[in-house]
Amino acid sequence: MELMEVMRRRKSVRNYTDEPITEEQLAKILQAAMLAPTSRNFLPTNFIVVRDKELLEKLADAKDHSSGMLKKAACGIVVCGDAEKSDTWIEDCSIAMTYMHLMATELGLGSCWVQTRMRKKNDGTPAESLVREAMHIPAGYEIEGILSIGAVDRELTPRDEKDLKDARIHYETFDSCGE
Ligand SMILES: Cc1cc2nc3c(=O)[nH]c(=O)nc-3n(C[C@H](O)[C@H](O)[C@H](O)COP(=O)(O)O)c2cc1C
């Protein structure tokens, strides 16, 4: 698919079928992560591939809402960054998450970003600490979030180009308005 077509088809998909994703699909998603740029090429990004159902349930329970799709996902990829290696680990991890999200779309898979950084359960427990414990993530590595991935039973339909609003695009100075 042309890149613009992939971008127009990318949506946050939170419902998956029981079909597993193939090794080839997973390999391509991880290659996309490896191709993502990092500041000064310090490569602080790390990816934990989770397919074990019990572990996926633990990850889903790291928050009280907006993470339940991980229970149905064929795979979750926890993205964490070596904060000692680079002060841009958040940016680097975010770009890698986005690359994987787009590659999943290219492969016809559903995927969704699950935010854990700065999020807490209703009882105040940081989502990040639950993910760290479940994944055995050592100190010094900060957790960006999780990409849930799964098969879908329908084609991802592209957004209409005419629906792309341009009011957030400014030319030369901020006070120009695109709309
Ligand atoms: C940084 C970031 C964090 C997000 N966190 C969550 C999340 O925790 N749970 C969720 O269901 N969706 C999450 N999303 C998905 C957004 O809700 C979604 O991208 C937005 O509503 C636009 O929908 P679209 O992705 O289908 O275009 C997140 C997206 C981003 C970029």
Image: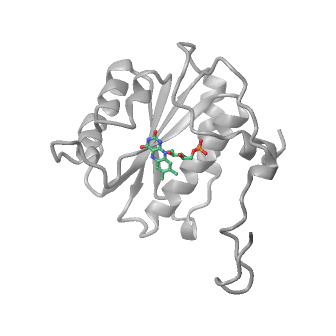
Provide residue 9's location: percent of width, then percent of height: 72, 39
Quadrant assignment for the N terminus: top right
Q: Is residue 151 left or right of residue 87?
A: right
Q: Position of residue 118 (x, y in %)?
A: 31, 55
Give the residue at x 71% y 82%. Answer: 176
Horizontally, is 61 left or right of 163 in the view?
left
Q: Name the residue located 65 percent from the left edge and 68 percent from the top edge.
A: 168
The x, y position of residue 80, in whole percent, is: 41, 50
* Quarter of the picture holding the C terminus: bottom right
Q: Residue at x 41, y 65 (%)?
A: 85
Q: Residue furthest front?
A: 179
What is the image's colouring? one colour
Q: Residue at x 41, y 70 (%)?
A: 87
Q: Quadrant of residue 174?
A: bottom right
> Residue 88, how many percent across, how many down?
46, 67
Q: Quadrant of residue 69?
A: top left
Q: Nearer the viewer, residue 121 or 47?
A: 121
- Which residue is most to the right? 2
Number of numbered labels in the structure image: 0
Image height of 67 relative to 151, above or below: below
- Relative placement, left or right, of 42 versus 156 is left
In the image, residue 89 above or below residue 67 = below
Q: Residue furthest top?
A: 18
In the image shown, does 14 or 78 lie closer to the viewer?
Answer: 14
Query: Within the image, what quadrant is residue 155 found in?
Result: top right
Of residues 127 and 52, the one drawn nearer to the viewer in this rendering: 127
